[in-house]
Amino acid sequence: MPRTPLVAGNWKMHKTVSEALQLVEVLLPRLEAVSGVESLLCPPSTALMPLSAILDKSRIALGAQNLFWESEGAFTGELSASMVAEFCQYVIIGHSERRQIFGETNDEVNRKILAAIAVGLMPVLCVGESLAENEAGRAAEIITGQLQAALKDVALSGGGQLVIAYEPIWAIGTGKAATPEDIDTLLRNVVRPTLAGLFGEQLSQEVRVLYGGSVNPGNAADFFGQPEIDGALVGGASLVAEDFVAITQAASG
Ligand code: 13P
């Protein structure tokens, strides 16, 4: 069964609500005109409620960039999974910036994944090795470890409940994308077999696996031409309407 490509924009800490509304006004009709691709926007938390009102009846999905695993309580500054699920279908979990800057561990990523799935949110689980790990030939080991830890005790009723984003840290925001062939090989030989070990062969074939790291309109088609790459998690280029639309069009084939 072919997997529907997913092109997701991770806006990170960019765009006030008024800027977000302006960007979506341009994006909405243009993304809706692209067939055969699912689009996902992940703005800052402040923009989730206003954008959900606009995207509600559209084909464009909305996602948060993080959540906290507890359901409620004295956790100043945090949002629970059910709060996120009021507005979103997806949530990015375990982005390398959260792991590196905020010290998020594999165990915390696992708790967040479990909390998301429990309320019906689809996690976009980010994994990826650092430059030092890559140069030491440890990419496969790091990615396998991250997947196994993050997905511990996770039960899926369908592969559509989970998205994986492979983002090598050395390719994020650097302009240095990994080569499409290398990504495809890694997804085929490392990510997909690890998912099969956790969820069985059939479910592993249904999970969409994205590439992230310096994806732009010039290189997107090369990534999407690889059989194992089911879409992209786009950072910088998702803030520019023209670029995000062009990347989405490239995924439509
Ligand atoms: P860039 O596309 O800016 O390299 O960012 C990738 C990323 O981190 C998406 O989550």
Image (cartoon, grey):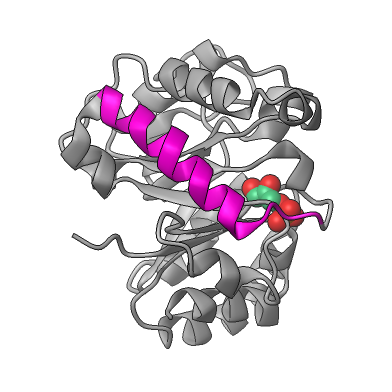
- Residue at the (45%, 61%) spot, across then down: 52
Using the rendered image of the protein, determine whether residue 69 is visible from the camera's viewpoint.
no
- Residue at the (48%, 80%) spot, across then down: 31
Q: Where is residue 229 in the image (x, y as percent from the top left)?
A: 46, 56
Q: Position of residue 224 (x, y in %)?
A: 50, 67
- Residue situated in front as seen by the camera: 219 or 120: 219
Q: Where is residue 198 in the image (x, y as percent from the top left)?
A: 28, 23
23 versus 73 height, above or below: below
123 lies left or right of 205:
right
Quadrant of the image occupied by residue 42: bottom right
Image quarter where the C terminus lies is: bottom left
34 versus 110 height, above or below: below
Using the rendered image of the protein, determine whether residue 74 is visible from the camera's viewpoint.
yes
Quadrant of the image occupied by residue 27: bottom right
Residue 186 lies within the magenta run: yes
Task: Specify start and end residues of the magenta stretch as a single range.
Answer: 176-198
40 versus 249 height, above or below: above
- Residue at the (37%, 28%) spot, across then down: 194
Image quarter where the N terminus lies is: bottom left
- Residue at the (39%, 20%) spot, across then down: 71
Q: Position of residue 165 (x, y in %)?
A: 52, 44
By secondary structure, the bulk of the magenta-drawn segment is best described as: helix
**Total marks drawn?**
0
20 lies left or right of 118:
right
